[in-house]
Image (spheres, rainbow, N blue to C red):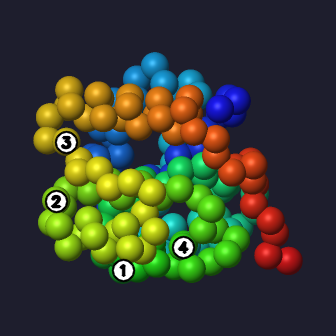
Amino acid sequence: MTNNNLTILMVDDDPDDFFLVRHALGDKKGSIDLRLVEDGEELMDYLLKRGRFEGTACAPPPCLILLDLNMPIMDGREALREVKADPLLRHIPVVVFTTSNDTDDILASYQLGASSFIVKPASYDRLVAVLASLVDYWVRSVELPPKCDGWRSRD
């Protein structure tokens, strides 16, 4: 992967989880632009550049979405369903990153089009290891869609 700046959009209603993920990325932060939205509705606003995300400067297209399942307003399941149903968004890899290890959640997430399912680690050391592996995979190992630097306009 040759991208120098990978935008990862984290969808999570817990700002403490965002803080931990940002901190756990450590030295990888230089090549990652980590953004946060708090629920599925905000995710869709971000992706569709609506509301407070109108305009390209405040909402760079993500190359990867980290999606929590259990959130208010629009949960991760519904958000995943909407992203994968949209022909202009479905190419964005979505990694479910949640506290749930319920087999029904795992199966449903993959059926809805999740790229991966990761249970949030309980320890900080394990979180660092999981995120290092995740970033290594998505930054160094796979080829992301060429539209990672921007998707087609809806206009």
Circle 3: residue type:
Pro
Q: Secondary structure at mark 1?
A: loop
Residue at label 1?
A: 73
Q: Is residue 2 left or right of residue 20?
A: right
Q: Give the mark toward the camera: 1 or 3.
A: 3
Q: Which residue is mark 4?
A: 84
Amino acid under label 1?
Ile
- From the top left corner, tell me how far across and down residue 70 is, in percent: 26, 69
Image coordinates of residue 147 in percent, x first then y, are 75, 53
Where residue 148 sits: x, y (%)?
A: 70, 49
Q: Residues within 10 Å of mark 3 (few under 14, many from 20)?
A: some
Q: Looking at the image, is mark 3 or mark 2 nearer the viewer? A: 2
Residue under pointer 2: 101
Give how far apart the Cα atoms at labels 3 and 2 are. Answer: 11 Å
Assess whether mark 3 and mark 1 are in contact (beta carbons under 8 angstroms).
no
Which residue in the structure is indicated by mark 3?
121
Residue 71 visible: no
Gap between marks 4 and 2 measured at Cα: 22 Å
- Element type where label 2 sits in the image: loop
> Which quadrant: the N terminus?
top right
3D distance between C-alphas at marks 4 and 3:
26 Å
**Foreground: 38 or 69?**
69
Please give left or right for residue 119 compared with residue 138 in the image.
Answer: left
Q: Image quarter for residue 91?
A: bottom right
Q: CA distance from mark 1 to mark 2?
A: 22 Å
The image shows residue 122 at horizontal and vertical percentages of 14, 41
Disc 1 versus disc 2: nearer the observer: 2
